[in-house]
């Protein structure tokens, strides 16, 4: 990805500060999807996206920045609420796969990029890609810490 999400820690912290408000608005705007922070809600969101967009490129180019931002925050918040993940950003390593992107750190060994998950779900077109990634991360977390 050529364009950076965040160029500095301050801009990320400002973005993070508004996450709850943005997600609440997103959930209200898309109440027909019954977004309740459950892993299953990722299936409902993904099915809606796949029904609306034939390719990842059309999804990213045609969906409003506000809706994309709401989606990626929502996907991340599912991890935060269900797995006690923490939002983070890596700005000191340009070689890092998720450089400058908002990520959720699930453990010291595992991080997920909600934006990458959204785009990958469009590419894979399975209806449950994001749900499967979530469940795999949950299983790894349980195996590591239980």
Image (cartoon, helix red, strand yellow):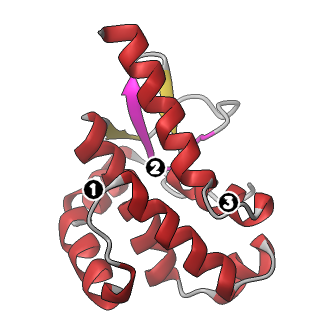
> Residue at image x 32%, y 56%?
38
> Residue at image x 27%, y 56%?
16
CA gap, disc 2 to disc 3?
17 Å
CA gap, disc 3 to disc 1?
24 Å
The earlier-in-sequence mark between 2 and 3 is 2
CA gap, disc 2 to disc 1?
9 Å
Residue 144, quarter of picture: top left
Q: Which residue is mark 2?
A: 102
- Residue 41 part of the magenta segment: no
* Left or right relative to 96: residue 22: left
Q: Which residue is mark 3?
A: 121
The earlier-in-sequence mark between 2 and 1 is 1
Q: Quadrant of the N terminus?
A: bottom right
> Residue at image x 67%, y 60%?
121
Q: Element under label 2?
A: loop
Answer above or below: position of 81 versus 32: above
Packing grade of label 3 (10 A; few <14, some 14-19, many >=20) is many
Q: Quadrant of the C terminus?
A: top left
Q: Which residues are magenta?
A: 98-107
* Residue 100 visible: no
Q: Which residue is mark 1?
A: 16
Residue 53 percent across, percent down from the top left = 72, 84
* Left or right relative to 47: residue 41: left
| Label 2 vs label 3, nearer the camera | 3
* Label 2 close to label 1 by CB (< 8 Å): yes
Q: Element under label 1?
A: helix
């Amino acid at each position: 990805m050529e364009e950076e999400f965040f160029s500095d820690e301050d801009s990320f912290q400002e973005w993070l500060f508004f996450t709850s408000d943005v997600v609440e608005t997103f959930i209200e705007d898309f109440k027909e999807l019954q977004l309740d922070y459950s892993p299953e809600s990722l299936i409902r969101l993904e099915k809606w996206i796949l029904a609306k967009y034939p390719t990842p490129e059309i999804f990213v180019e045609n969906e409003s920045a506000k809706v994309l931002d709401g989606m990626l925050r929502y996907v991340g918040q599912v991890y935060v609420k269900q797995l006690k993940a923490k939002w983070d950003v890596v700005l000191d390593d340009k070689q890092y796969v998720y450089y400058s992107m908002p990520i959720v750190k699930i453990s010291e060994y595992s991080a997920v990029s909600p934006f990458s998950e959204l785009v990958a779900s469009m590419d894979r077109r399975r209806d449950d890609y994001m749900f499967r990634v979530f469940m795999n991360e949950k299983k790894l977390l349980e195996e590591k810490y239980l």
